Amino acid sequence: MIPVPYHGIHAAAAQPDAVMVRWLKPQRRCARVRVKEHTCECKVRIYELCQAGGLFFVRRTDRGRSGQQVMETEWLPSVRAQELWHNIITGRAV
């Protein structure tokens, strides 16, 4: 049996009561950033749960005809960032 390639997760559509996330311009706070989780590349908007300098943040990349725009959340402790990631993926935060 040939294994099916992993396609990746997709963020759910925003729920009516979704919380608005405060998206900020990226800050080059660390030389290296590790992507811990990410959504599928097949969508125009990609989310990444990132870790750097002992903190976590979510990076959002919007790709369009005029290029791409990258935004990120505030840098958070692990538990808060995991909760935010879960809320974005399930459509409870946008």
Image (cartoon, helix red, strand yellow):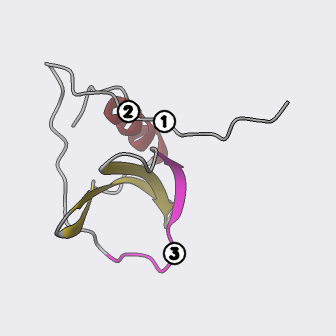
- Confirm or deny contact between disc 2 and disc 3 (CB under 8 A): no
Answer above or below: position of 26 versus 79: below
Could you classify mark 1 by the number of other residues whose Cα lies within 10 Å: few (under 14), some (14-19), or many (20 or more)?
A: some
Q: Quadrant of residue 82?
A: top left
Between 80 and 33, the residue placed more toward the observer is 33
Amino acid on which the number 3 mark rests in the picture? Arg
Answer above or below: position of 92 versus 62: above
Per the image, the residue denoted by label 3 is 32
Q: Quadrant of the N terminus?
A: top right
Taking the view exactly as shown, the residue that stands out farthest to the front is: 1
In the picture provided, is 71 more to the left or to the right than 5? Answer: left
Answer above or below: position of 24 versus 27: above
Between 84 and 67, the residue placed more toward the observer is 67
In the picture provided, is 5 more to the left or to the right than 31? Answer: right
Q: Which mark is residue 35?
A: none
- Choose mark 1 or mark 2, whichever is in front: 1
Mark sitting earlier along the chain (3/1): 1
Q: Which mark is residue 9?
A: 1
Give the extent of the magenta segment. Answer: 28-38
Between 43 and 17, the residue placed more toward the observer is 43
Report the residue at 19% width, 53% height from top: 23
Per the image, the residue denoted by label 2 is 89
Q: Quadrant of the C terminus?
A: top left
Report the residue at 20% width, 21% height from top: 15
- Confirm or deny contact between disc 1 and disc 2 (CB under 8 A): yes
